[in-house]
Image (tube, grey):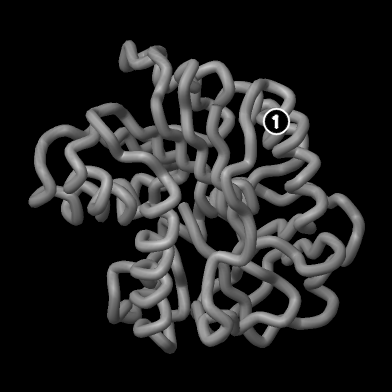
Amino acid sequence: MDGTAWEDIRVDKRIYGDKVDIDYARTLDFFENRGGDKKLESKYNYVLFQDDAPEIAIERDRQEKEKIGRLLKWDGEGSVLDIGCGIGRWGESILEKGWKYVGIDYSEKLLGIAEENLKLFGENKMLLHGSFQEICEVLRCERMEEGFQKIFINGVMMYINDTDLEKGLKDILSVCNERCEVYLKESMAVDERLTLNEFYSDNLSQNYTAIYRGIVEYKRLVDKYFLCNGFEVVDEGSLFDEKLRNRKETLDYFFVLKR
């Protein structure tokens, strides 16, 4: 599950500063019923949202793959673990590069779309059902505990409560290869943390819940779990051009790490 959007939110549905747990069942329900009865114009709308402007979702996908693709090393062969893979949109370019793609997501609906989306991109892939908190267990069941050369954590942390997030990041370290690159991207609050709790979005035609942690919060997590374990920051910053930023309080921010 990767992406962010909110429109026409009631003020009492915004929680600033305080750390509030969200209900995973409601988050899962959002993605299992993504789009409702309406037809989404682009497959990328499922995870990048922007339902009323599919051209923005398409351009964001293009810009992200171009920018991050240049920052990562694709020499030789290897395997990529995509956590919160959604419809497998990153699998499109990863498989074309000849790398093995392993995507994991909690939404069976999105995994079904991913299967269809990636069927023409080769067989060197595996799509697994599981939550962020179950990464190690899911990989163990598939006998895939060996280290990955690349790990993507893309747009999933905003749906994970603090305690589970820290456990998940610790687990992710255990499946990193000795030499590994990590791409971490999230929708972050420009200032203080903002939690949106079960509000109705006219743009999405659904209730939506997410935790927008501040950039400073994520920098602390990167330091605690990655920099303190031999990784270094290759690059970080705002992911998209100014014309693709259409939210005042949140920003798509990324880190590329390596060791």
Q: Position of residue 254 (x, y in %)?
A: 59, 55
Q: Residue at x 75, y 76 (%)?
A: 249
Which residue corresponds to mark 1?
Answer: 227
Pick the front one: 21 or 235: 235
Q: Quadrant of residue 232?
A: top right
The reply to whether residue 172 is in sight is yes
* Residue 240 appears left or right of 193: left
Q: Can the viewer see residue 26?
A: no
Element assignment for label 1: helix
- Residue at 88%, 66% (x, y): give it: 16
Q: Where is residue 69 drawn, in percent x and y?
A: 37, 53
> How many labels, in total?
1
The quarter holding residue 124 reads top left
Give the residue at x 66% y 59%: 210
Percent x, y for residue 202?
A: 56, 86
In the image, what residue occupies the spot 46% across and 72% down? 49
Q: Nearer the viewer, residue 25 or 242?
A: 242
